[in-house]
Amino acid sequence: MKNQYFGDINDYRKYGILRCLATVGPLRLGICWMLTPSDGSTDGQQTSYLASPSEWRPLDPVLFDALLEAVERGQRDVSVAKASNLLPAAVFFSEEVPTGNASRAGYLSACLDTLAETDVVFFDPDNGLEVRSAPFGAKASPKYLYWRELVAAYQEGHSLLIYQHHPHEVRAEFHKRIAREFTRRVSPRALWALATSSVVYFLAAQPGHLAEIRDSVEAIQSRWGREVEVIDLLDA
């Protein structure tokens, strides 16, 4: 996650999903932003939706107003989410992701310590899950979440939500491939793809969280069905 993305259209959908997880039922949300430095590119400039409140505001008026105010003030920073209480009772881990094996291992340990009392942990890497071209500890590694990290978090008892940019492959096949990998590594009780026009979020539920997460998924479908396709990957 880069702060330059804060408030763009993808963020609106993302926070909409997170708010359903944070406000429907008793589960406590933990956020690992996986921050990386802004790169000076034009990425994150898709904010024109804010000029069409009649179309976009009804999806989540509180969220829309908060993002509009932040963008208008030039406050494009994830700290706004905490300051404005967009995600009630959430716990945040906002350190930048380091490179190097030892530093990265320490980063995950500190993250899981900070989020230990939460139920659902959201990982927000720039690109998503690891790829062969960026091995653990490599220069590009801060842009990815590695399976070893995902497994460690799941084994600590957390349900997981993972940001993933859609790669250049058939989406349904990509979703199935990731579902097979989830099943092989952690065998989640339930697994959904929450797919938008350009990104997908993988939501893996612990057995003890299943009922509450199903309620949140139903809320996502009800409130954000226009923008977010909910796919049950274990039934697909």
Image (cartoon, rainbow, N blue to C red):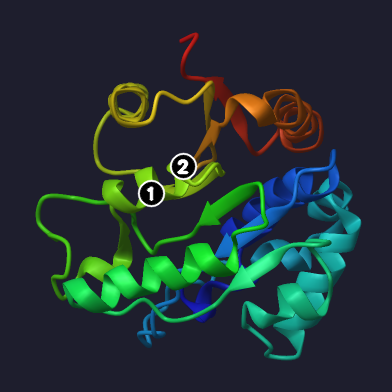
Residue 48 visible at all: yes
Residue visible at 49% across and 68% down in the picture: 111
Compared to residue 148, the image places residue 203 above or below, namely above
Residue visible at 80% across and 29% down in the picture: 222
Q: Quadrant of residue 64?
A: bottom right
Foreground residue among 101 and 35: 101
Residue 152 numbered mark, or none: 1
Compared to residue 120, the image places residue 76 above or below, namely below
- Compared across the picture, whether 8 is left or right of 51 comes to left
Residue 181, image x, y percentages: 28, 29
The kind of residue tagged 2 is Tyr
- Compared across the picture, whether 57 is left or right of 6 comes to right
Residue visible at 60% across and 62% down in the picture: 115
Residue 22, image x, y percentages: 77, 50
Q: Quadrant of residue 166?
A: top left
- Compared across the picture, whether 64 is left or right of 30 comes to right
Residue 67, image x, y percentages: 76, 71
The reply to whether callout 2 and callout 1 are in contact (CB within 8 Å) is: yes
Compared to residue 120, the image places residue 2 above or below, namely below
Q: Secondary structure at mark 2?
A: helix
Residue 39 numbered mark, or none: none
- Compared across the picture, whether 18 is left or right of 55 comes to left
Q: Marks 2/1: CA distance?
A: 6 Å
The kind of residue tagged 1 is Ala
What residue is shown with label 2? 154
